[in-house]
Image (cartoon, coloured by chain):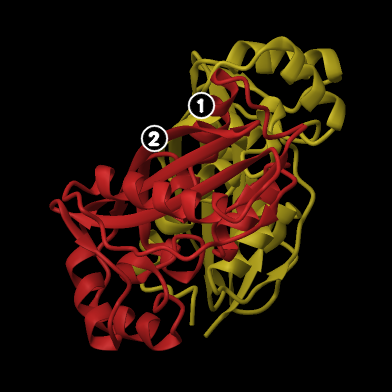
Chain colours: A red, B yellow
Amino acid sequence: MKKIILASASPRRKEILKQMGVQFSVLTGNCEENPTKTEPAEIVEELSRKKAWAAAGLIAQDCIVIGADTVVAYENKILGKPKDEEDAVRTLEMLQGKTHQVYTGVTVLERKGEEWIPHSFSERTDVTFYPVDGQEIRRYVKSGEGMDKAGSYGIQGYFGGYVKKICGDYWNVVGLPAGRLFYETKKSGINLRG
Amino acid sequence: MKKIILASASPRRKEILKQMGVQFSVLTGNCEENPTKTEPAEIVEELSRKKAWAAAGLIAQDCIVIGADTVVAYENKILGKPKDEEDAVRTLEMLQGKTHQVYTGVTVLERKGEEWIPHSFSERTDVTFYPVDGQEIRRYVKSGEGMDKAGSYGIQGYFGGYVKKICGDYWNVVGLPAGRLFYETKKSGINLRG
C-alpha cells in the first residue's frame, strides 16, 4: 500500500480519517487561498487542488495526497470564518431557523513514477437549524468554539444541538466527505483503508 | 436546575449528551423490551417510555428522566442486533446500496412534586449506503464492531465510511436525536443545557 498524506492541518479532518480506519501522515505546503472561481462547489474544488499540489511539491516518493477545503454558503453567498464576535452573531442570526449549504472539495493526487494523477470532486450537504434566539446565539459565540470555523459554528459541538436535520453526508459538514472519498478512490483503484 | 437522569447505559447516548453540554447521571431500571406496537415509530416511543418509567420508579427527588430506544428498519421491517456473524452479513448485504430508516423514540419525564409529567416523541432519519461488496462486508463483520448494534453497523465507525447520505438528524442514527430533544424540552419550559 502507498503512503497516504493528508494535506490539511485541520484536527477535524484528521479525526475523521482516523475514525474511518485510514493510516496517514500530515504534510501541508504553502498555497494562496484566493479562488478564481465564484460558485461554492468550484471554489472548494479549486482550493483543494491547490492544497494537494502544494503538499505534493514537497514529496519525492510514490504516495497518495489528499487535499480538502470546506465552505459554508447561504443563498449562494459564501460565509467564511468570523472576523470577530459581532460577525459570528450576525452569521448565526442569519442561519438560525433556515437551511444552508456546506461544500467540501477534495483532491486526491496519486503519484505513479514521475507522474501525479489527479482526481477532484466536491460534495454538498444541506443543514437546517431550529430557531435559536439571540441570547442563545450570544452565549454560544462567547464560548469561542465557533470562532475558527467557516459559518461560525461546529456541527460536532454545542451548536450541533440546534441542528434540525441534514441532507447529505454528515462528515462533509465536519470537513471531509468520507463516504464519497472512499467510493471515488475505490473506483480509481486506490484503496485508502488497507 | 433540576438533576438530569439518563435512563440508558448506552455509551453512545452518554457521549452525545456530554458533547452537547448536558450534565447528567445515568440510572437504568429493569423493564421488559417486548413492544405491543408494530410500527417502528410507535415501538421506539413505547420502549423509551418503559425505560424512562423504570428509572423514574427508583427516584424520590425532583428531576428530569430521559429514556430512549433506537431501531433500524428496512422496508418497514425492524432489524435488531445481529444474532451471529452470518446474520450480520445477511443484514448488511440487504442494506448496502439502499436506503433504510433509523427511528429513535425519546421520553422525558419531569417530576414536579408528587407528579411525573411525560413528554414522548420519535424521530426518523433515512440512511443511504453506497454499494459495498461481500468481501468488504465480511471483513467489517469479522471486526466485531457492529455486533452489539441494531442493523449490524455503527454509523460513527468504519462502516460509516460506506454512507452516501443521510436525511434527518445524524445523532438520531447514533442513538439520540439531540436537536429535537432540546427543541421539544425547551417548548415545555425544560432547560437541559444550563
Circle 1 SS class: helix
Chain label for disc 2? A
Residue drawn at x 75%, y 46% as measured from the top left: A23
Depth order, front residue of B41/B162: B162
Q: Quadrant of the C terminus of chain A?
A: top right
In the rendered view, tell whether residue A123 sits above or below residue B142.
Answer: below
Mark 1 residue type: Glu
Q: Residue at x 51, y 61 (%)?
A: A156
- Residue A121's label in the rendered image is 2
* Camera-nearest residue between A184 and A107: A107
The label number, if any, that marks residue A184 in the structure image: 1
Residue A110 picture location, percent across and down: 58, 34
How far across and down, in percent of the image, does residue A109 sit?
53, 38
- Asked if badge 1 and badge 2 are on a common chain, one would say yes
Residue that protrudes farthest toward the front in the picture: A114
Q: Are dots 1 and 2 in contact, CB under 8 Å?
A: yes
Tell me residue A183's x, y (percent).
54, 26
Left or right for B193, reference A40: right
Q: In this rendering, is residue A105 above or below A160?
A: above
Image-based side of A93 in relation to A158, left or right: left
Looking at the picture, which amino acid does disc 2 mark?
Answer: Phe
